[in-house]
Image: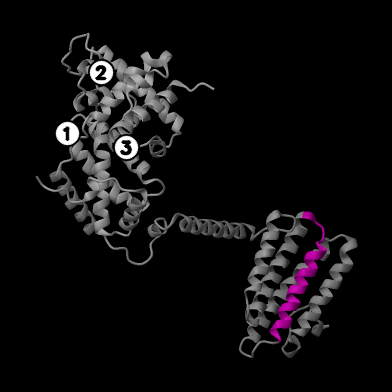
Amino acid sequence: MKQFPSLLLKKDISYEELNKIIALAKTNNDDAMVDLSEYVYSRIYSYVYYRVNHREDTEDLVSEIVLKLIRALPKQRGNFNAWMYKIAKNAIIDFYRRRGVRSETSLSEIPYDIPDQSTPVSEIILTKEKLRKALSILTEEQQRVIILKFIEGYTNPEIAETMGKSIGAVKLLQFRALKSLKEFFKKKGL
Amino acid sequence: MKDKIEEILDKLLKRTQKGEDIESLLKEYPQLADELRPLLKLAVEIEDIPKPELDADAISILVAKVRQTMRSRKPSVGFSLKNLFTLHPIISRTVTAIVLVFVLALTTVFMSANSLPGNPLYQIKRISEKIHYAITFNDEGKAELHLIFANRRTHEFESSFKIGEKIDRKLLMKMLEETASAVDISQNLSADHAPLIRQKIALCNKKQLAVLENTKQYACQCDIDIIQTAIKKCRELHACLGCEQTPCNDPYCPCNE
C-alpha cells in the first residue's frame, strides 16, 4: 500500500494553516500548490463521489476540478471552501451536460434488493451505493447539506458560509433532505 | 417561543453526535418523537457510512499533473494589465477607481472644449484651463497659454454674439486681459523665444480687432461704447507689439493713422 504524499489528506487543518498554504500557493510555490491540491482532492472527493454514478468518473472529475482550481487560484477571493465547492458544482453540471443526461436518477432505475416490508429503517444497512442513489432524488442544495454535514463533518456555520446561506436555511435544508430520504427509503420498502 | 421542528432536529443531531441515546432524547419531545426518530436514525446511519476511500495512485498522478501545470506556467515578466487584476483587491479596486476617474475627467474636459458661457460644461473648461496654467512653470509656456486662452475667448465672444446678438462684456474683458497678459510675459522672454510669441500675439490681436469691427456693425447702440473702448485697447496693444518698426499693413493700426 502506497503512502499518501501528504498528511493533509489525513488530518484536519485549521483555517490559519489553510490560509497560509493558499497564500503561498498564490505565489506559485510548488509545495504549497501540491498541498493545496491534496487538500482540495480530499475535500471534494466525497461530494463528487455521491453525485456521480461511477468511481472512474469520480476520479476523472475530481482531478479535473483540482486542475481547474489551480489554474484559477490567482483570481480566488473570499471564502476558499465556498469557492472550491462552487467550482466542483459547476464541473459536475458540465459533466452531466457533456453526457447529455440529467444528474437525477429515476427511482425506477435504482436496483435494490427489496427487503422484508417489516424491516424498520433503523435496521437497514445503509451502504455508500444505496446512499448515492437515494441522494439523487434530492435537490442540489439538499445533497450538499447532507454530504457536507454527515459525510464531511462540517458544522452548520461552515456549511452556511460555504453555501452562502443562513444557518437557519441550512437547518431547514437538512430537515427537508432527511425527510425526503426517509420517504424514499419507505417507498422502496427499505 | 416554541422551536421549529428543524431547530429541534438540529439540536438533537448535535447531541446524538456526542453519543447520547436517541430514545432518551426523544422523551424530551414526545409529541415529535414519531417524526424525529427515523430522521435521527437515518442521520446516524449516514454518518456511520465509511468515507469513500481515496486512491493513492490517482493522487500521485494528480500531483504529477499539478507539478507539470506549475512548470508550464510562464513566469510573469514586467507589468501587464492582467497582473493589475490579480493584485490585492483593495489595490486593484483603488487603481481601477483612479483610472475610471481619470478617464471620466478627460472625457468631460474633452466634451467641454467647445462649450460657451452659460453651458454647465463651461465651468469645467475654465477649471481645466486654470489647472493647466497652474502646472505650467516656465514663462514661455505661460505666454503660450495666455495666447491660447485669448484665442478661445475671442472665438467664444464671436459665437455667443452670433447666438444671442448681445455683447458678453465679461468675456470681452477676459479676451483683452488674456492678450495683455501674454504681452506682459513675453517681455520677460529671452531673445530666442520672444519674437515668435510676439508674432503669434500680433496675429491674435489682429483677429480680435477684426471680430470687434465686425461685431460693431451689428451690435446694439448701447454696446457701441464698450466695443469702441475694446477696439482702442486692441490698437494700443498692437502698437505695444512694436509694429512701428516695420511697414504695417494693418488698416486699423495707430501707426497708419
Q: Work out whether A56 lies above or below B119.
A: above
Task: Indicate which disc, 2 or 3, sits on the residue closer to the N terminus.
Answer: 3
Which amino acid type corresponds to the residue marked 2 in the rendered image? Ser
Query: CA separation, marks 2 and 3?
Result: 35 Å
Name the quadrant of the N terminus of chain A. top left
Name the quadrant of the C terminus of chain A. top left
Q: Is residue B174 visible?
A: yes
- Asked which quadrant contains residue B40, the reply is top left
| Residue A148 in the image, given as x and y percentages of width and height | 32, 34
Which amino acid type corresponds to the residue marked 1 in the rendered image? Arg
- Asked which quadrant contains residue A139, the reply is top left
Q: Is residue B176 shown left or right of residue B35? A: right
Kindly identify which numbered label has been placed on residue A90: 3
- By secondary structure, the bulk of the magenta-drawn segment is best described as helix
Residue position marked by numbered label 1 in the rendering:
A55
Q: Is residue B163 shown left or right of residue A189? A: right
Q: Which color scheme does this rendered protein use?
A: one colour
What is the chain identity of the residue bearing mark 2? A
Residue at horizontal 63%, vertical 79%? Answer: B137
Residue position marked by numbered label 2 in the rendering:
A122
Secondary structure under the numbered disc 1 in the rendered image: helix
For this rendering, which residue is in front, A12 or B112?
Answer: A12
